[in-house]
Image: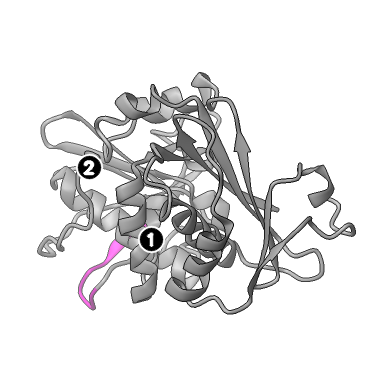
Amino acid sequence: MVALSMILLENVVDLDAIAILNRLQNHWGISECKLSDAPPDDHKDAKEIKNNLYMEIEGRICFVIPIDAPIPDEDVEFAMQISHLWLDAKEYVSRSHAHLIVGVMSPFDREITALDQHLILTKLVESVLHPLPQALGVYQGDATLIISPDFYKEQAATILKGQIPETLWVYFGLRIPEEGSANAYTYGLYKFGKNEMEILNSRKSGEEIMNFLMSISAYVIGADVTLKHGETCGFSATQRVPITLSKAVWLGGDADDTLKLDYDYNQPPRKSSWKFWKKN
């Protein structure tokens, strides 16, 4: 399994391998981290990768590959259309004529959890962004996310506080077709072996249901909890949000069944952890 992110650039740049390594070691505290001239020959997936920047991070084979071409328009266009956490994404994406592919491979000799792999990937992407002020954005294709560099670094920093940067891994959609009918859904939990979740026709505010969906998603990912049909979930002894499993509503006809969270309770709103973002 390979976890990937892409960093959008105006033009191809020379990677500062030492700066990236120092960031991983000194900022993220990863002691088991070193540069490699090439991937091990006995890793079948690594043989297909061209000669670029390779690292071994805590036993994982990682790479950063410069590509002298933009990410295909059809790949990022939809992500830009549905991006509500980066409102001016199109302005920056349109300037991109190159990109970096950043990847983390699973070790061939042992299992690795999806959470561990995404934590390493996020730390690596942040370490590449840190000495790269010319980066335009980060594309997380497996969750249809387009993310500003500043927002990415801000959210990645929460890992140091023991938090899950769910907005970097999962897309949170919000649809309010009419007043008093707020809908929210996830796309990306499947990477962690979890059902996607939806809140339908809520009378609560869009901000409140988004905050709840983000919080419960972070809990599910971080604690490796599998929510099931017929159960309830919540963040207090009195909060009981019923869960049902049924056909997806907002993810399209081909999507797997999703967990519907019946957000109908009198719990006071929790502090919001999300905001609209414009890159300075």
Query: In the image, what residue type sits under mark 1?
Result: Ala
Region rendered in magenta: 236-243
Whether residue 236 is visible, yes or no, is yes
Res 277 label:
2
Q: Tags 2 and 1 in contact by the CB under 8 Å rule?
A: no
Which is nearer the eye, 16 or 234?
16
Whether residue 232 is visible, yes or no, is no
Q: Is residue 30 above or below residue 42?
A: below
Local SS, label 1:
helix
Q: Residue furthest right?
A: 42
Dominant SS of magenta comes to: loop
Whether 206 is among the magenta residues is no
Q: Quadrant where the C terminus lies?
A: top left
Q: Which residue is mark 1?
A: 156
Precedes in sequence: disc 2 or disc 1 = 1
Q: Residues within 10 Å of mark 1 (few under 14, many from 20)?
A: many
Query: In the image, what residue type sits under mark 2?
Result: Trp
Residue 60 locus on image (x, y percent): 69, 65
Residue 131 locus on image (x, y percent): 42, 54
Which is nearer the eye, 256 or 45?
45
Write down the quadrant of residue 10 in the picture.
top left
Which is nearer the eye, 161 or 57?
57
Q: Would residue 100 appear left or right of 145 to someone viewing this image? A: right
Q: Is residue 79 above or below residue 195?
A: above
Local SS, label 2:
loop
Which is nearer the eye, 142 or 152?
152
